[in-house]
Image (cartoon, helix red, strand yellow):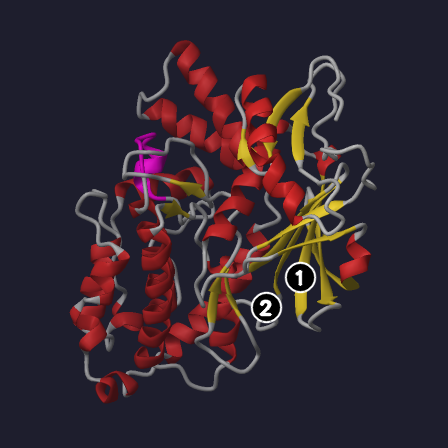
Amino acid sequence: MRFNVGDQVCSVNGVHISSIDDVLYALTSMSYMEHSLMDDRRSSLIPVLTYNPYRKIRSALMTVTISNSLVRDGLRIDVGRGHNRHIVKIDDAYDIGEKLGEGAFAVVVKATDRATGRPCAIKIVNRSSLDRKVELALRDEISILSDLRHDHVMALYDSVATIERYYLITEYLEGGELFDRIVDKSSYTESEARDLCGVLFGALDYISSRGIVHRDLKPENLLLASRISDTNIKIADFGFAKFAPNEHSLATMCGTPGYIAPEILRREKYGTKSDMWSVGVIVFILLGGYPPFYSTNTKKLLMLTMAGKFEYDPEYWGGISQSCKDMIRSLLELNPARRASAGDILNHPWMEEDRERLRRIILTKSQMELKKFIARTRLRKAINCVVFVNDVAAISCHNALFTGKNKRRRTKEIEDCFA
């Protein structure tokens, strides 16, 4: 292994490194273990991620040879289900199919695992397009998804790092977005909505118990595994997710307008309860068909969120059970210390309401309003995110949260987060 002048080592075999002494210790302590795992009993592949600001090289995957023999440059796949394998190219392990989507940094394609025949989705990220902050966030996403094992969280099967790209091999979800399925149903009842909520809060209870905050819960990130089941929900897109050991661990402002918790907009420290606010907004839409806080003006939308005032329009909520409304109010509580947790909701009286009675509450008007909401949301996606950055900065000034250099620094943080 050869380092160049200016190389900063980030990790060795997935272990974060802070000094060159840590690098030497990591290599020395793991050499025998890695050596014994190799089929040829002569050498080992150890991923070493580096960053060089002088040569403008983002990072690299190095081959570490611990014997006299040379090892062909290749890939190491860390498989989430408990085994490892080595391949030379991604094509050796997967048949690549159609493109499913494309974003600023990544392309997602459908693929098939050659060894098992299992369909999957591969997120391909070009490392040359990532700055250091975004790359660290991607590695956090990989680490978090590797830690999660739940039937209703999108599974990460494998992750691959090469000099040029990251590959995230995930569960293939063909059912589409949850809200699209709801508006296509011939009939939709409060009982069905409660079943969906039971699944959703069960998954969130698990996620929060792991000390993880999703930070971007919204309808687009609630997907269905298949075209058959209406309740096999999968929580997806952990790109903003972070580990939070307590309820005051995080400070970065991120998320989607309309779903961001008010404490985040107030620039307070936050934790898992911020996700409960976001899911409270989702559940409100799920039952009523429209959001509790809405404006076409992003600045006004954020101000409405911080005020936290909403009403149940009798046209859509007149027949819905009072216990359901009480449950939603416990989620849309401005004070995160008093806000309900996922575990609280699973034990809420609404979850014990008589099923037959809830089946008789048909949400036809809410269903129709939800269809309009989906159309408006997709139209709004065309609006430039710079508008949001400027509005957040203006609101922060209005609330006297930013002053002088601190204002400029924190505004830059917001720009970095939403860029």
Q: Residue 121: which numbered mark, if any?
A: 1
Q: Where is mark 2, residue-wise?
A: 173
Tell me whether the residue at label 1 lies in contact with that at label 2, contact meaning CB atoms closer than 8 angstroms: yes
* Range covered by the magenta-colored residues: 261-270
Counting from the top left corner in percent of width and height, residue 305 is at 33, 44
Q: Is residue 419 visible?
A: no
The residue drawn where x is 83% and y is 42% is 72
Reply above or below: 252 against 19. below
Counting from the top left corner in percent of width and height, residue 168 is at 64, 52
Q: Which quadrant, please, contains the C terminus?
A: top right
Question: Counting residues from the N terminus, which is met first, the one under dot 1 or under dot 2?
Answer: 1
Q: Secondary structure at mark 1?
A: strand
- Decide if residue 214 is on the left or right side of residue 50: left
Reply above or below: 201 against 259. below
Q: Is residue 147 visible?
A: yes
Reply above or below: 71 against 218. above
The crowd level at tag 1 (other Cα within 10 Å; few <14, some 14-19, many 20+) is: many
Amino acid found under the numbered disc labelled 2: Leu
Q: Secondary structure at mark 2?
A: loop
Amino acid found under the numbered disc labelled 1: Ala
Give the alpha-carbon distance from disc 1 to disc 2, as whole Å. 8 Å
The residue drawn where x is 27% and y is 41% is 307
Q: Is residue 359 magenta?
A: no
The crowd level at tag 2 (other Cα within 10 Å; few <14, some 14-19, many 20+) is: many
- Decide if residue 412 is on the left or right side of residue 48: left
Residue furthest to the top? 404
Q: Which quadrant of the figure has residue 250?
A: top left
Q: Residue 366: which numbered mark, if any?
A: none
Q: Which quadrant of the figure has residue 110?
A: bottom right
The residue drawn where x is 60% and y is 32% is 12
